[in-house]
Image: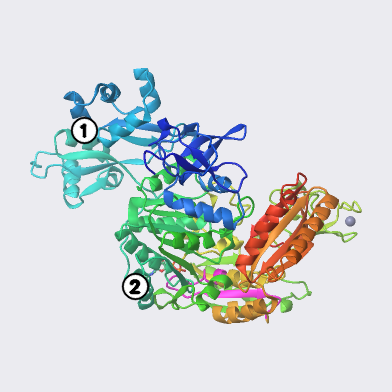
Amino acid sequence: MTSDTQYIEVAVALPVYRTFTYFVPEPFRGFLAPGKRVLAPFGRRRVTGYVFGQSPRPEDKELKPILDVLDDRPLFPPAMVPFFKWIADYYKYPIGEVIKNALPGGLNVYDYALLTITEKGSTALRHGQPPPVAQKVLAPLAAGPCRLNSLIKKIDQKIPGTLLYQLEQSGWITRKWKLGGASTKARLERFVRLADSDLPLDHLSKPRQKILEILQTEKEMAVKVLKETVPTAAALIKPLESAGYLTIENKRVYRDPFGESIKPDTPPQLNAEQHQAVSRACDYLDKGYHPFLLNGVTGSGKTEVYMQVAAAALEKGRFVLVLVPEIALITQMERRFRARFGECVSVLHSGLSVGERYDQWTRILQGDATVAVGARSAIFAPFDNLGLIIVDEEHDSSYKQEGQLRYNARDLAVVRAKQNACLVILGSATPSMQTYYNVTTKKFTELTLTQRVEQRDLPEIRIVDLRLSRDARGIRRFIAPELQAAIKETLERGEQVLLFLNRRGYASFPVCGACGQPMRCKHCDISLTLHQRSNAYRCHYCGYSRAATSSCDICGSTKIKHLGLGTEKLEDLLTPLFSQARIARMDRDTTTRKGSILKLLKGLKDKTIDILVGTQMVAKGHDYPNITLVGIICADLSLSFPDFRAGERTFQLLAQVAGRAGRGDRSGRVFLQTYNPEHFCISAARNQDFKAFYQQELSFRQALGYPPFSRMIQLKISGKDPHKTEKHAQILGDHCRALKASHLPHYRSVEIMGPIEASLTRIAGRYRWQILLKGSDTGALHQFINQLTAHSHTAFTHRRVQVAIDVDPVFLM
Ligand code: ADP
Ligand code: ZN
Ligand code: ZN
């Protein structure tokens, strides 16, 4: 955009799908850039809009002028404009709302500019070089940096943006954007370094001499560290500084997420497979778009491959984005990247405060951070020159956002890489069907790591048939004797045990002992779970809870049987069996408070936990070398879900949990308890045989025409009134069929399934219906939905019944 740009393309923050062209009045020209916000008239309203770029001169009509420019500097780089457009188009979401979703919350509220005069500016001012208007602005700055607002008050005069721009261009001032109010303070620590090594030492006291001796070998040292050798150091450094021996400086330090300072590391010697993977990926750096699958067994050192390719990208002056499926794993990835790359690493996730997130965003935008590690939403990190995007544990369904903008960050990573002409590496030990299919169809290049690092063995996995596991009285046992014995042995050796059960709470299936009726949620069509620790029955879908003393709704009996095993009950069962062991539990209930996940992980690391019981939170990517035994309490829980991906998820989960065992010097063992020992998901997981699983699953998908052989779009219809909702679903279904019938043969490949009632018929008081659109021709499928939303516009904007469009749905129930 140039200073004479007259027409701009703007995405307004309203639920509309296209962008608009506005006229730029003279005074605003030269201040506009893609990524800045403007105030613009829209109908009779004034709305915020995001500038996308220059527009060609429109043919006929008089265009409305923008009213104001709201930002001094862009909120996102121009490279992201096509990305936002792609998302809006593909996920059928209003473009302005896409951007709103992408930007960190609170971005707009507080930012202010801090102006600082430079050396050059001070000199120029002293010599009276700047023109009078400029001098008026520079003069107050000589006393120190000043906020723009206070400066305006001081000189009692408006400062035109053009003037600030000129001052900046002349190198007389610098502008920094800060966050007002809840700002985040950098952590500062005092460091000392030797100033003059030729000064005589002999007349100094012993401790002072000691300090200087240390500094002679260590270039620089934190006072905190110095105090470990010379306890009185804090008091001694000041006089030493005055005497010219050393200098003291406050420096920003980084702590690891555990609060310990991070020691820089050096890259290890890669093994042959890692080396091969790194060099093959690096061959494509700077050669445009290239997608890879890094298919490496658990513990094969994928992170090391990521880091070395990242180093190569950084060396070429390009930036690196690393996605991890959840916050607990960011911690681990962040620590390793910080140790390798230091201060240029930023983190982005929902656990950060608004201020922290803003800071991180700004660091990326200004090029201070060249690497970003983050969860799903970090796919929107405002890099303008990406060289590499990494998606770790790419199979993980947490990359899919449910609700609002329903995107999949894994898929968007590939799109962004294509648009930025850069590399993308999807990594996993259990690749998704979709990704591996892309390998077999030559869309992706596969890099493989078949061995664990340092020739460590994959854990030995034993299947335990739960059908046979009963005690003497014939009562089912949740922990089979062989697993119990193995836990005992492991604890005796001082090693750690991980027990996995994908169900939290105490009892997941409370049933009336008198009439047999399950305890159900008032708002959802689902069983309540008893949470004994909090003395309540809870619904896991809407949060509804009732007292643990409640009686049966049907017959009033208070004799409730607590069937169904949850992590709480498991913990209780273990306590008497292993009374010496320190047992901890990691699930959503124990990790609601900020920092609680970190505390648990630290417990594992510091070996203050002997047995960790947990849900799928423990399954993902963690690397704790002292865990040598993993027990999978019931492998079948996710197998029976009414979802075509149930098998894929079960296989991934089991293989991942198993992969937590034996990552250190000692080999690991896994006990997999199941009621379906013959099921191919279970046996493939047992053999850690991804290819076997893939082949079988693929033929099942092909037979039924499921992804990856087709794409899906789900219409999620929900409302408070069961009849209205059902009727609306039927009407929408009729629209779909009519549209297809009127455009044959073009839409022949589009299959319309439903409307049907969802498997979870009611959540949080809303009745749920679904229509599934499926097609082998992606283009036709998308055209179909575009045409449907345009033709049946009112069906999508009904007051009482909501219709959400879920493109490439993951949660189908
Ligand atoms: P993955 O993500 O593939 O499960 P990680 O990247 O967590 O595996 O690596 C497992 C462990 O092996 C880590 O502790 C890592 O530091 C270590 N490691 C990785 N590569 C090497 C190597 N070439 N030599 C020695 N240790 C390595
Ligand atoms: Zn009853
Ligand atoms: Zn509920």
Q: Which residue is mark 1?
A: 119
Q: Which amino acid is tagged 1? A: Glu
Q: Which residue is mark 2?
A: 279
Classify 300 as above or below 692: above
SS under mark 1: helix
In whole angstroms, how far apart are the C-alphas of marks 2 and 1?
46 Å
State which region is magenta: 656-677
- Looking at the image, residue 710 sits to the left or right of residue 335; the answer is right
Classify 222 as above or below 462: above
Q: Residue furthest top?
A: 156
Asked whether 798 or 596 is in front, the reply is 798
State which quarter of the image contains the C terminus: bottom right
- Does the magenta run of residues contain 673? yes
Asked whether 789 or 279 is in front, the reply is 789
- The image quarter containing residue 234 is top left
Which quarter of the frame holds ligand 2?
bottom right
Classify 654 as above or below 57: below
Q: Residues within 10 Å of mark 1 (few under 14, many from 20)?
A: few
Q: Residue at x 53, y 53 (%)?
A: 85
